[in-house]
Amino acid sequence: MRVIADFHIHGRYSVATSKSMEIPEIARCARVKGLSLVGTGDFTHPKWLQHLHSTLREVEEMGLYVYEPLPSVYFMLTTEVETVFEHEGRVRRVHHVVLAPSFEVIEQINERLSRFGSLSKDGRPTLSMPASELVEELVQVSSDVEVFPAHVFTPWRSVLGAFGGFDSVEECYQDMSHKIHAIETGLSADPPMIWRLSRLDRFTLLSNSDSHSPQPHRIGREANVFELRKLCYREIIEAIRARDNSRLKMTIEVYPDYGKYHFDGHRSCKLPSGEPVVLSPREAMELGERCPVCGKKLTKGVMHRVEELADRPQGHRPEGSIPYVHMLPLAEVVAAATGSSPFSKAVSETCQRLISSFGSEFAVLLDAPVEEISRVSGSRVAEAVRRVRSGEVVVTPGFDGVYGKIVIFEEGG
Ligand SMILES: [Zn+2]
Ligand SMILES: [Zn+2]
Ligand SMILES: [Zn+2]
């Protein structure tokens, strides 16, 4: 059976998260999106944990949970934590995603982690401990717990990030590196970028939305497509650990240029043209990595960081790698086709018509024949979906916290 999973989201107690981010709404949006499995996020937070207890029911022997009114969407107990520690004279902040099989296991995890920082301040707690110690604590609770570094190339708070990161996964996790089987690509990077680093060949690449709001626009915008004989926690963990491309069939990726940290730049520094400072890695290097407006250090994007660490040219594909598709949220595609805002009423009505015709957003984006989309919503939306599928899309790169802009049709096209 096909299982589309998004392991990394945040609940309402995380900073900058929508207050409607609660289980019933997450389940509803996951179903609209076409996700069959979604992470709960934030299981370390006491109030969120209470909410999970009161809304979710364990499915017998699966290690997964459901919200009863919508039993077609499964939940996995997940969280994200930040570790902060000093290494070789610099403070390092790294985010990690944790997957767990049961409430009993997470009670023990929370008890251990609460010794390293407050779990109630933020849905994503900050823990004063080295990454290797985090992994050690987690595997001591249960060998079923899985942990992997989050959005590995974002400039801040990531294992390979330009500011406060490391040059390799091993440098970060030290003697516990062998327990790390996967890395999360993050929105601003995609598998072909990561394939340029031979030091990452052994890791399973996972893609998650890191969503802070429940709209189908955000949730599941990146996801993992499994083909499983049986849906259960253990099958999924085994597929991830084995980097098994017969079970983990592909990842769904936004165009990496769309991500908020693809290029270098300064969002609040304006050129004489009125445009903010956005630079490709090469342009930034020519300027000594300094902003041409304020002269300060640029926020180094993911592409630049990949360029620094890469030991291969573009185009290399490691053996056994997991396939991927580039995709964009349906509202973005319809908005680009119709020239309206993705949040407008007209766009939302078109999306709803498509979703009720084909079953879910992923069914529209991945599977529906173009002619049938055309019958439901007109030829321009159908053509937009076709172009997104075939990569005929231009995206002006995101930078310094600003999303990239999607161009599916050239002016007047
Ligand atoms: Zn994070
Ligand atoms: Zn996150
Ligand atoms: Zn500047």
Image (cartoon, grey):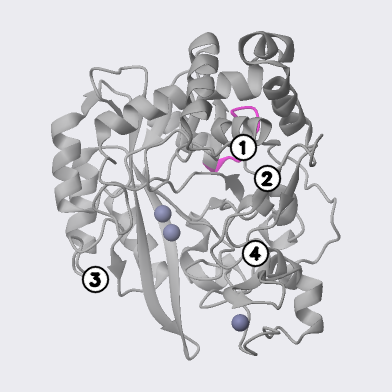
Label disc, if present, on residue 31 of the rendered structure: none
On the image, which quarter does residue 152 sit in? Answer: bottom right
**Mark 2 CB lies closer than 8 A to ligand 2:** no
The range drawn in magenta is: 241-249
Q: Is residue 132 left or right of residue 17?
A: right
Asked if the residue at tag 1 contacts the one at tag 2, i.e. Cβ–Cβ closer than 8 Å, the answer is: yes
Please tell me which of labels 4 and 2 falls first in the chain. Answer: 4
The residue labelled by disc 1 is 328
Residue at position x 67%, y 31% in the image: 337
Residue at position x 30%, y 68% in the image: 126
The residue labelled by disc 2 is 406
What's under tag 3, amino acid-wise?
A: Phe
Asked if the residue at tag 3 contacts the one at tag 4, i.e. Cβ–Cβ closer than 8 Å, the answer is: no
The answer for how far apart the CA atoms under marks 2 and 1 are is 9 Å
**Camera-side mark, 2 or 1:** 2
The answer for how far apart the CA atoms under marks 3 and 2 are is 42 Å
The answer for how far apart the CA atoms under marks 4 and 2 are is 18 Å
On the image, which quarter does residue 231 sit in? Answer: top left
Asked if the residue at tag 2 contacts the one at tag 3, i.e. Cβ–Cβ closer than 8 Å, the answer is: no
The answer for how far apart the CA atoms under marks 1 and 4 are is 19 Å
Could you tell me what secondary structure mostly forms the magenta stretch? loop
Q: Does the magenta-highlighted stretch encompass residue 238?
A: no
**Camera-side mark, 1 or 3:** 1
The residue labelled by disc 3 is 116
The residue labelled by disc 4 is 302
Mark 1: secondary structure: loop
**Camera-side mark, 4 or 2:** 2
